Amino acid sequence: MSFATDGALAGARIAVTGANRGIGRALADAFASAGARLVLHAREPAAAAAVADALGAKAPGRAIAVAGDLRDPELGARLADAALGAFGGLDALVLNAGQLGPMQPLADTDFAAFRAVMEVNVDAQARLFVATLPLLRESRGKVIWEGRGSGRVIWMTSGLGHFALPGYGVYCVSKHAVEGLAKLAHADHGGDGIVSVAVAPGMVRTEMLTAATRGDVPDSAVDVEVAGARFVRLLAGLGPDDGGKILDLTNF
Ligand SMILES: NC(=O)c1ccc[n+]([C@@H]2O[C@H](COP(=O)([O-])OP(=O)(O)OC[C@H]3O[C@@H](n4cnc5c(N)ncnc54)[C@H](OP(=O)(O)O)[C@@H]3O)[C@@H](O)[C@H]2O)c1
């Protein structure tokens, strides 16, 4: 697939979590086509290496791999070190990886599972942001977005981050918290030039959507390549005035 967005992110240093499959993999492909340099995260080392190798073949020297469970407290430091070592810094952090968790009514909550999903979808996202913040601050005007603030952080939310549907359980709660984190990062660090937004991708054909809809994926759901191209347009146009916003990817 060729994108009208080719070159839109030329030289930008972008980290994507969960880049091995689903939306994250599509973002990696689209960002590479748009000229970005990529730190590609996956939980398993082999999966991270596979996506970095595949993109490195198309974009030599522009894709490196970082592996680890999101709950590993050292993951953020490893990701930051990798970005610094390979590319001299980081311009954008895309916090894509997340879990659906058990689909159950609130009254039936399994609290051990609830805590485990919150650790991945909320705690780990905050930790990754904090670990990469020094690099994001330093990105100011160096590569792209010259004169338009410093690094960007994109927190992946969902419609279920701003409304509730029956049976979505901890996923719904965690995505509300993700939107809180996006706003808090803006409140605390927007003044330093950090542009923090939450992005709801809309319905995208992935394993998570299949599980969430119990296989009954609506016709209106889009393929991951569509989400990837939209994300390039969103990221390339993101400016300081957007800080703290909750953005709907389907508008891009
Ligand atoms: N698809 C949609 O329609 C939709 C709608 C709204 C929001 N979203 C959001 O978009 C993001 C991507 O969703 P998706 O549909 O692409 O999901 P997906 O196909 O289920 O992929 C999830 C990704 O997150 C990774 N991940 C999950 N838990 C992890 C952990 N503990 N440590 C490291 N990696 C972990 C997975 O790694 P493994 O391969 O190792 O499991 C995988 O790479 C999520 O934040 C999701 O909530 C999606």
Image (cartoon, rainbow, N blue to C red):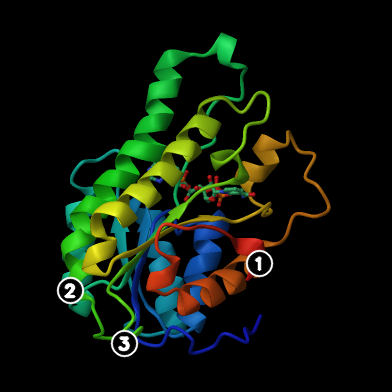
- Determine the secondary structure under disc 3: loop
Task: Please determine whether, in this image, residue 199 is positioned above or below residue 56.
Answer: above
Distance from disc 2 to disc 1, alpha carbons, whole Å, reads 30 Å
Q: Amino acid at mark 3?
A: Glu
Distance from disc 2 to disc 3, alpha carbons, whole Å, reads 12 Å
Q: Amino acid at mark 2?
A: Glu
Tag on residue 251? 1
Crowding at dot 2, Cα within 10 Å, few <14 / some 14-19 / many 20+, comes out as: some
- Determine the secondary structure under disc 2: helix
Check disc 2 and report the residue beneath it: 138
Residue furthest out toward the right: 219
The part of the image, by quadrant, that contains residue 72 is top left
* Residue 154 falls left or right of residue 81: right
Crowding at dot 1, Cα within 10 Å, few <14 / some 14-19 / many 20+, comes out as: few
Q: Give residue 28's position: percent from left, percent from top.
A: 47, 69
Check disc 3 and report the residue beneath it: 146
User: Residue visible at 54% across and 88% down?
Assistant: 6
